[in-house]
Image (cartoon, rainbow, N blue to C red):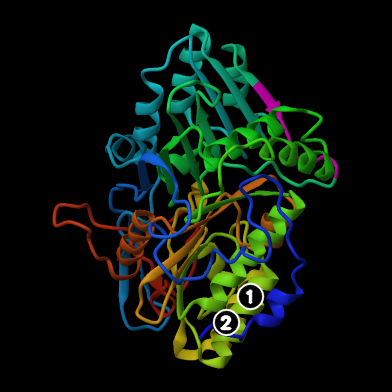
Amino acid sequence: MRSLVLSSLLLALPLVACAGSGDATDEGDEGWLPDGKADETGTPLKYKTYDVLFTNPLCREYTYATPVKTADGSATLTKKPKNVYCSRTDVPASASRPSSPQYKLLQWLAPLDADDEVFLAYLSFSNVAVSDRLCELATAGTKITFVLDAASTQSERLKQCGAEILLRGHAGSIGYAHNKVILINPKGDSTYMKMTFSSGNMSSGVVTHHENWHFIDVKRSSYFGQSHVCLMDAQVSETASAGRAQFKTSLDNCRNEIDAEEESDIKAFFIPHSNDRKRAQKYLLGGVTEAASIDLGAHRFGHSGLVTALKTKLEAGDLTLRMVADDDLYWLDPVVGAPQEVGSNLGFEADNVATLEEAGGDNFEIRFFETNNSEHLLHHNKYLLYRDGDGDAFGLIAGAANLTGAGFNDNFENIYFIKVPKVLTAFETQFARVWEGKKATSTEQDPPVATPRHLMPESFVPGQ
């Protein structure tokens, strides 16, 4: 029987009449439900390959100049958690592994030439290795179009190489240009199109932040593939990206021309399109309604509707929640000592965590990635992995947006609800690494492991 705990929240959401021949109507738009297997019902995503890569950086050991006790006083710490705390000196070793998203991306870019096209959209761009290759391609005549929130040293360099740099966002009540997507030959004539979306920016987010990246050879004629071309066209157009209404009109007109059904096992929501905003929130909260347990990764944690939904289920005893976040969030509300704002997280986010701790008791636990604050290296993942009563994953929220109101309403964002079985398995495997230190194979490097709240250092040591 479906849980009714959050029915009032879902009913409060406006009805959705989504544009596009493949968009579901509100009446049948309940794709977050766990019933049935995604590959047995509806229209599954058509792809040749789909690889989920987690940065899981490879970093040398970092020791404290002076040992530090744990917050509960039970142990003395002499070093930072392995492969969690990193610095930029670890980039070469991390980037050279075939499992690195940067390695995979450079592989994809390697064979391109003057007849090819690459579209990219990110909040920020500082990755030198990717910039080097894009510059080579642009100089050789490859069409490179890069949408950014703000100019950077690398974007100016790439512009000098012949790429088109477009600054978007901050217009017509739209917030940041926070999309994270690459399309290779988006308007080509091959059967498949290479694309990637991620939690990470084109920065340390490809290698030493803690992120997830999705690399797909997707069927070009699929609804999923063509809808991303619609997103590209809307972002490239100065008119379409100048306001919410213009963005919606552009996407609606384009998606209405797609001659394919929207997939049943993956949904893409392009914020701030008004219907996509409503659908994204409906799937986000619908997954909470159905889940018996949730594994949650966050950088920012300010989505009030999500916090309320989680709190309601925790108070009812209907949910087990495990959360992983950056330690910037921890230091706002440490076990001992005074609160410190050491990163971009704010006090109300720590208050949200405290609300869930109080509501959930033993059914809620948060652990932290002890990252390198001095170099602004982060746990930057944002996802919710929904599980049923047997502990099996039935859905995933992932993509560019932070778990904030702005992420799901105001910015340019690409958010996904995914039921593709191999993707769910990949996230289950990753969470076991992070929470339990469980290796996927005996030869795998030591995984990055999150620290329980009571075992955090008793004090914040700047620069360490």
Amino acid identity at mark 1: Val
Q: From mark 1 to mark 2, how far is it between C-alphas?
A: 8 Å
Q: Which mark is residue 111?
A: none
Q: Residue at x 61, y 86 (%)?
A: 5
Which element type, helix, strand or loop, lies under badge 2? helix
Q: Quadrant of residue 289?
A: bottom right
Q: Answer whether labels 1 and 2 touch (C-beta < 8 Å).
A: yes
Is 238 inside the magenta-drawn segment? no
Residue 307: which numbered mark, if any? 1
Q: Which residues are magenta?
A: 165-172
- Relative side of 291 to 342, left or right: left
Quadrant housing the C terminus: bottom left
For the point 51% across and 80% down, the residue is 336
Q: Residue at x 69, y 28 (%)?
A: 236
Query: Which residue ends up furthest to the left in the rendered image?
Result: 442
Instruction: From the top left corner, tell me how far across and down residue 265 is, in percent.
Output: 47, 56
- Please give the name of the residue rendered at 48% of the width and 49% of the height, measured from the top-left corner: 377
- Mark identifier at residue 356: 2
Q: Position of residue 150 (x, y in %)?
A: 69, 34
Judge whether residue 168 is colored magenta: yes
